[in-house]
Image (cartoon, rainbow, N blue to C red):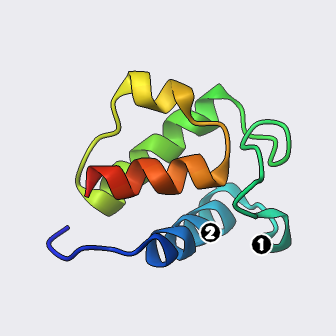
Amino acid sequence: MDEKLTKDTVYKELVNILVSDFEIEENQITPEANLFDDLDLDSIDAVDLAVRVQQFTHKKISPDNFKQIKTIDDVVNAIVELL
């Protein structure tokens, strides 16, 4: 991405991805929501999410960083760090 994205913009895009690609109800998605416990994502979904994030940012989250991600806020912070 050429422009600097804000956390708010990244969060909104992440919500769009989760709703459209993973069929998660928007009201379930909060910064504190755990990807696995609250949103019922599995390891395959996590890989798919990483790919979607890469498509959105044109940058790749390292596997070590991705293993640390547990919540929506963790994803947003990881994306912001990439940009």
Q: Earlier in the sequence, mark 2 or mark 1?
A: 2
Mark 1 lies on a secondary structure that is helix
Query: What is the number of callouts on the image?
Result: 2
Q: What residue type is labelled 2?
A: Val
- Circles 2 and 1 in contact, beta carbons < 8 Å: yes
Badge 1: residue crowd in 10 Å (few <14, some 14–19, many ≥20): few
Number of the label disc, if any, that sits on residue 15: 2
Tell me the residue at 81%/41% (across/down).
40
Mark 2 surroundings: few (<14), some (14-19) or many (≥20) residues within 10 A: many
Image-based side of 63 in relation to 43, left or right: left
Report helix, strand or loop for mark 2.
helix
Residue 41 x, y percent position in the rendering: 73, 39
Which of the 4 image quarters holds residue 73?
A: bottom right
Residue at 47% in and 53% down? 77
4 left or right of 48 in image: left
Q: What's the mark number on residue 43?
A: none
Residue 48 lies, in percent from the top left, at: 51, 41
Determine the CA span between mark 2 and mark 1. 7 Å
Q: In the image, is 82 to the left or to the right of 75?
A: left
Question: Is residue 41 placed above or below 66 in the rendered structure?
Answer: below
Residue 10 image offset from top left, x and y in percent: 46, 69
Q: In which quarter of the image is the N terminus?
A: bottom left
Residue at the spot 41% in from the left edge and 21% down from the top edge: 64
Q: For the residue marked with disc 1, what is the amino acid?
A: Glu
Residue at (45, 42) in percent of width and height: 50
Residue labelled with disc 1: 26
Residue 29 location, x and y as percent?
A: 76, 64
Q: Is residue 28 above or below residue 2?
A: above
Task: Locate the C terminus by quadrant.
Answer: bottom left
